[in-house]
Amino acid sequence: MKAPRVTLDQWRTLQAVVDQGGFAQAAEALHRSQSSVSYTVGRMQEQLGVPLLRIEGRKAVLTDAGTVLLRRSRQLIKQASQLEDLAHHMEQGWEAEVRLVVDAAYPSGRIVRALADFMPKSRGCRVRLREEVLSGVVEVLQEGTADLAITGLEIPGYLGSELGSVEFVAVAHPEHALHQLARSLNAQDLESQMQIVIRDSGREQPRDIGWLGAEQRWTVGSLATAATFVSRGLGFAWLPRPLIARDMHEGRLKPLPLEQGRTHTPRFKLFANKDKPLGPATQILVDSIRNCAAPDPSEECTE
């Protein structure tokens, strides 16, 4: 890549000339001589090969090309300043990145609210968000490739912070054969029907969770895919209420009238990498996740 011919200082000088209304005013604002400012801008135009300013009376006015380049240069200066701030924060122990792994069953709305709360406090710290299912979350944390993890499973040797529960509801399409029975359903009724289950993303010890009594099962890779299958009448499943609230409200899914086990409600916890102390940015993200763990009204629906 070719090295830039124009320096950040030259762009700052041009900005000062335009913002202050002239070379003399820019020189005063920058605490430099007027001749130094004039030379810097003149040399800059030579290097770029395009006129940036024209003089009208006693005032320096941008050319069309100068207007475009100055606008882009403001972003360049802003990014350079942010880079310097990030380096300063990192010197003080501020992380450049926090790695967060979340079970796909945890409501995305709560994560969005937490990240929106974290963003203005992040000081440039990035968040690398990863979704896994069941033991996949545990493996990522134990491998050390995540700083924080949200899961409904217990992790041996780790202390978790309570985030609240998520209700899973047994549902099927309103015209599904189970609903056509028009009565309370038992396990024998479910056994002959297709159940949609979500594959555990863990590699070491994947596990099957929940009721798996149906003779026919389709296993899919995500909750969203499972919800799509069930809403098209291809089976039944227990799905998180926040994910299917709209489908239930709009009549594409209907709770199954089970005699027992209509719902189950796993409790989710936030775990931290025990081999790595929490940095200041990670601790702020932890606080944001905790503060935004309450259910949102959009997660509910009228059945």
Image: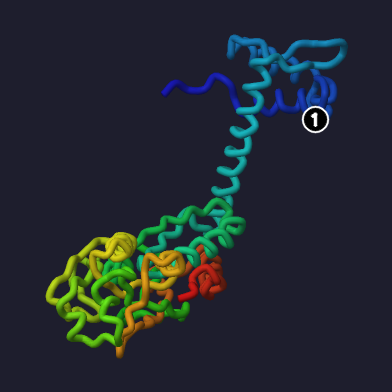
Q: Residue at the spot x=79%, y=16% of the render? A: 60
Residue nearer the viewer, 87 or 294: 294
Give the residue type at disc 1. His
Q: Residue at the spot x=58%, y=50% of the render? A: 88
User: Which residue position is annotated with label 1?
Assistant: 31
Q: Residue furthest bottom?
A: 259
Say which quarter of the image contains residue 35: top right
Residue nearer the viewer, 23 or 200: 200
Q: Horizontal and vertical percent for residue 64? A: 67, 15
**116 lies left or right of 186:** right
Q: Horizontal and vertical percent for residue 270? A: 43, 74
Q: Residue at the spot x=27%, y=67% of the render? A: 136
Q: Residues within 10 Å of mark 1 (few under 14, many from 20)?
A: few
Quadrant placement of the N terminus: top left
Q: Horizontal and vertical percent for residue 201? A: 24, 65
Q: Is residue 199 above or below residue 124?
A: below
Residue nearer the viewer, 118 or 84: 118
Q: Residue furthest left?
A: 215
Q: Horizontal and vertical percent for residue 137? A: 31, 68
Q: Is residue 59 above or below residue 158?
A: above
